[in-house]
Amino acid sequence: MSELNLPVLDLSLLDQGPDAAARFRDELRAATHDVGFFYLTGTGVSPALEERLLQAAKDFFALPEAEKLSIENVTSPHFRGYTRVGGELTQGRVDWREQIDIGPEREPVTDPDGPGYNRLVGPNLWPAAQPELQEVVAEWHDHLTGIARKLLRAWALALGAEEQYFDRHFGDPQTLIKIVRYPGKNDPTPQQGVGAHKDSGVLTLLWVEPGKGGLQVERDGEWVDAPPVPGAFVVNIGELLEYATQGYLTATNHRVISPRFPDERISVPFFFNPALDARLPIIELPAELAADARGVSQDPSNPIHATYGENALKSRLRAHPDVAERWHPDLVAARTAS
């Protein structure tokens, strides 16, 4: 382990010959078995694209309040658009951040007999005052989708499966990009930027504004800092990959502590997940790996579902109760009854 508290992996090793690729896969397997988090360098994402994304994020959050609220997520039954500061919950507590949520651009699914997670399918909401935001997000999405696919193929081989294992079971990927601003707080004690949680899907690639700390990862019952590394993403796995490996790989609790005023922090997590109706089958691990599988975490307040859409819907409903109550009272009632 480095002094950064998390391992540092270089994705470009996969393109440097069989020995280097094998070393990367070994490091990848170890990092996500032991920690569930790591830094990823060598992704090929240019500093220029990072700068364009950061500027687009700052420009969006600098828009007049009325412009941002014109795409507020309470107007979207698909949980898309802008969430004002204090408009999202983690573990029932208010997160001190504002954000815009962007998913796959789709027509809504209108089948009344379909599964509840179909409600997550639909169009995005874009600010009319900032047309360039959609362009840079599309470019970012394409780059990070390529990185995610490359990582998943390396994971498959590292776990003893065939290289295309995840490609075959993903279907049409369900992605989510959050562009997040954490405003500074004056409170004398650390405040919840986003509360402790595990991601509900497979893979998260997090980009953080250079020089901005606040991310913490739980290791051995203690919270350790994960400051940004120039040119690197912070990568973590979600509950679905823990499920597929029966706990050999581990989804890890993490949180963000708000910056102190007048500082602020921009971050952009990219969630790469299977189609909503996809069920990742349990991977048949080699015996030596299976012996170290710890089983899936059991938390009655946070059940892990085999179908990705069920996991995603669970997270959306509890994070945005105002959207849920306005558009999906039947789903809220069903969960209350159970």
Image (cartoon, rainbow, N blue to C red):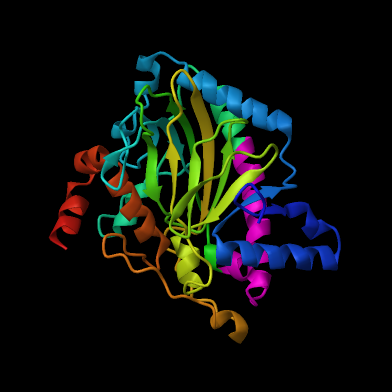
**Count of picture labels:** 0
Farthest residue to the right: give it: 17
Picture quadrant of residue 162: bottom right
**Foreground: 200 or 72?**
200
Q: Is residue 332 visible?
A: yes
**Would residue 156 be counted in the magenta stretch?**
yes
**Foreground: 121 or 49?**
49
Image position of 204 (left or right of 27): left
Q: Position of residue 156 (x, y in %)?
A: 64, 69
Instruction: Look at 70% across and 54% down and name the residue there.
Output: 9
Quadrant placement of the C terminus? bottom left
Instruction: Look at 55% across and 30% down and name the residue there.
Output: 134
Q: Position of residue 155 (x, y in %)?
A: 64, 66
Q: Which residues are magenta?
A: 139-168
Q: Position of residue 88 (x, y in %)?
A: 32, 37
Q: Position of residue 286 (x, y in %)?
A: 61, 83
Instruction: Look at 24% across and 42% down and name the residue there.
Output: 321
**Foreground: 129 or 57?**
57
**Foreground: 153 or 264?**
264
Image position of 239 (left or right of 323): right
**Would residue 311 be counted in the magenta stretch?**
no
Picture quadrant of residue 231: top right
Q: Report the predominant secondary structure element of the magenta stretch.
A: helix
In the image, residue 58 sits, relative to residue 41, either above or below, namely above
Quadrant placement of the N terminus? bottom right
Farthest residue to the top: give it: 64
Farthest residue to the bottom: give it: 287
